[in-house]
Image: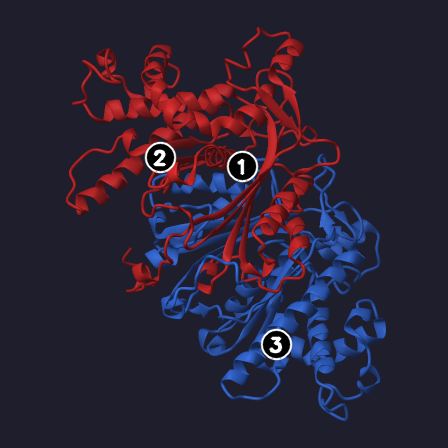
Chain colours: A red, B blue
């Protein structure tokens, strides 16, 4: 903007620390769970409604000795101890949660108990300079998701993830490739102050989630195309360029639908794609559909679920281990998927692979970025 | 730490953008208010209890057409319009509030309505690189403070502040001088989900606030002493080195007590201070008191209130205009004090003056830093 008094530092690029990303990750979830086949029986619904329809096997829940504060305290303490780190190494703390114990005291002030001996705090309100001063950022996400009886209940879960973010990381955030989309929507909220349960409009939530995915993927592709053109490469980005794809997971079936959705994006984005054979064979009937008309189109969904099945099995399924066995943890959900990947593949198998990360928060704010 | 894989960039210092600070500030508070003398009559308390005892004249309150979202939307829109800025100029948004409408949807997602046309969003979760890419950070703080009938009610208020933070600012954050102290305490919380009102333990809150002030000032002074020693200067920092002093203001009287408290810190920190004449005259009896024993010591308070009266009038009183006329806005409180200063002093009067800023949030997290 012409009116902007701030000027861009000339050496901005050279200033950026090398290979910023996730240096360490710790996950914690409750030890108790409800078996979803038992919940089907208890709720008197058809067998398979939760296990096959939603793709969920177990749902973690907290005991009366646990709350969101204890989940977060545990996961942070474990992360620090396991990496033999002093709390003085942390220059910035970010906490994400949608679970509250009261209406004003933040989880962050509770986490301060761990840091009381540390005097390393920088100015927290505005500027994250920790990388420039050699300190880590600590990102903590934790939630307890409980729903009223009915369709939403089997999508519950609980857990927390803590991540150390800094330079020279083994999992590096790819720069300049983030596709973000935010919108003011009441796709999920808790207006009833005396109830633990949110108000759920499942259909609206799915539309918000999938439309955010469409928008983020479009922006991501545009950015990578621009980067490639600069480098003199003139080819289109497709899902083949992702080694793995992980997603915020309200329930596993929606993630499977998301892979199908991204394949639909690839298909509609390139009119030259071969429909005679390969993954797109037999899809010529869908050449002229519009993304925004297909959120609930069963034919499109079915066709692209089928076309993307192998892609899903190879690039996404393993990441759903914790989501399947513990349920939706809300804010740490997508990092639970990352933990699932890390637990099942060797460093050698992951090296050089571009992992797409679709992060989603109701209300809503979504980002598609990638890790290498 | 020896185990830290991240390394410090060699050119960290040269990377820091020049003169980062507050580029623009906008404040908004409701147009309705309760006159505190009328509230004294209505509550049947002694005349002067609120006006003199707390130092409050008026208390702003919202109409049924306003909520914390509308306060924040208004103040952001005004800031952007008045500075002819496009929403594309903003690379990071931070929102601080203790007022909730529901238990999950954040005010930030509501503010997204203003940004919907903008595609400039960076990765919001972790890294603030906006200064390195020439964008501003936008900091929004807003609250509606309502209390149950009783002692706390007259300390209510409502309002929002939006600030543009970036390089080449007219109000520059002094680097390396922040004194921060955080602690897990229930000095203020809202455990009753159906009530708008917090649970207040006034005595605990005052002790938390004043002990945080002591700790922050100690750290701040130690840091500036270290800076001065490096430069070869060997003198002690005192309140005389601040041109103005502003504070988070639960009510004006506590701020006046805070100035007295800082003077007590100066007094106890330097045993050589002259008690025969000057501001410390007649205070020799307090030579051996300990800071932590004096939070509720009437004699100490009275003596240091008197000793600091002139200091308060000259360096702090003007900053309490909005706090006195509108009440406590919670999160934007201290920036309301900054706005009050800016409204009453000319740029010439403020130039070269070091303004101390004591920011406090219940629970608690406090920082003393300075602006030039």
Tell me the mark number nearer the camera, choosing from 3 and 1.
Answer: 1
**Which chain letter goes with mark 2?**
A
Q: Report which residue position mark 1 lands on.
A: A331
Position of residue B323 relative to residue B31, above or below, is: below
Residue A194 in the figure: left or right of residue B28: right
Counting from the top left corner in percent of width and height, residue A51 is at 54, 15
**Which chain letter goes with mark 3?**
B
- Which is more N-terminal, label 2 or label 1? 2
Q: Report which residue position mark 2 lands on.
A: A216
Counting from the top left corner in percent of width and height, residue A369 is at 37, 40
The quarter of the rendered structure image containing the N terminus of chain A is bottom left
Near-viewer residue (A72 or A301): A72
Instruction: Please give the name of the residue rendered at 62% of the width and 71% of the height, measured from the top-left corner.
Output: B219
Counting from the top left corner in percent of width and height, residue A103 is at 67, 41
Q: How many marks overall?
A: 3
Where residue B161 is drawn, which disc sits there?
Answer: none
**Which chain letter goes with mark 1?**
A
Q: Is residue B260 visible?
A: yes
Q: Report which residue position mark 3 lands on.
A: B221
Position of residue A264 relative to residue B278, above or below, is: above
């Amino acid at each position: 903007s012409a009116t902007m008094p701030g000027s861009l530092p000339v050496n901005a690029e050279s200033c950026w620390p090398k290979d910023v990303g996730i240096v360490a990750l710790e996950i914690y979830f409750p030890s108790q769970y409800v078996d979803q086949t038992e919940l089907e029986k208890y709720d008197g619904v058809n067998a398979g409604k939760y296990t096959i329809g939603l793709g969920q096997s177990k749902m973690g829940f907290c005991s009366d000795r646990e709350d969101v504060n204890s989940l977060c305290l545990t996961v942070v303490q474990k992360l620090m101890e396991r990496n033999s780190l002093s709390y003085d190494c942390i220059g910035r703390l970010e906490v994400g949660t949608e679970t509250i114990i009261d209406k004003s005291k933040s989880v962050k002030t509770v986490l301060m108990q761990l840091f009381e001996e540390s005097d390393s705090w920088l100015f927290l309100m505005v500027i994250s300079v920790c990388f420039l001063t050699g300190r880590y950022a600590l990102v903590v996400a934790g939630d307890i998701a409980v729903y009223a009886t009915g369709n939403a209940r089997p999508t519950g879960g609980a857990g927390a993830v803590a991540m150390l973010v800094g330079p020279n990381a083994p999992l590096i955030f790819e720069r300049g490739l983030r596709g973000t989309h935010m919108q003011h929507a009441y796709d999920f909220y808790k207006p009833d102050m005396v109830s633990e349960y949110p108000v759920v409009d499942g259909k609206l939530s799915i539309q918000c989630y999938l439309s955010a995915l469409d928008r983020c993927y479009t922006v991501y592709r545009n950015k990578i195309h621009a980067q490639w053109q600069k480098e003199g490469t003139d080819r289109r980005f497709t899902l083949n360029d992702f080694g793995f794809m992980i997603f915020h997971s309200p329930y596993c079936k929606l993630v499977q639908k998301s892979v199908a959705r991204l394949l639909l994006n690839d298909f509609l984005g390139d009119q030259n794609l071969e429909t005679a054979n390969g993954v797109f064979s037999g899809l010529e009937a869908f050449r002229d559909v519009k993304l925004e008309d297909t959120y609930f189109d069963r034919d499109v969904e079915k066709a692209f679920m089928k076309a993307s099945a192998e892609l899903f099995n190879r690039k996404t399924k393993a990441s759903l281990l914790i989501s399947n066995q513990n349920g939706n943890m809300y804010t740490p959900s997508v990092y639970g998927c990352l933990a699932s990947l890390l637990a099942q593949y060797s460093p050698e198998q992951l090296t050089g692979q571009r992992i797409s990360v679709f992060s989603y928060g109701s209300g809503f704010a979504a980002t598609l970025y990638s890790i290498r």
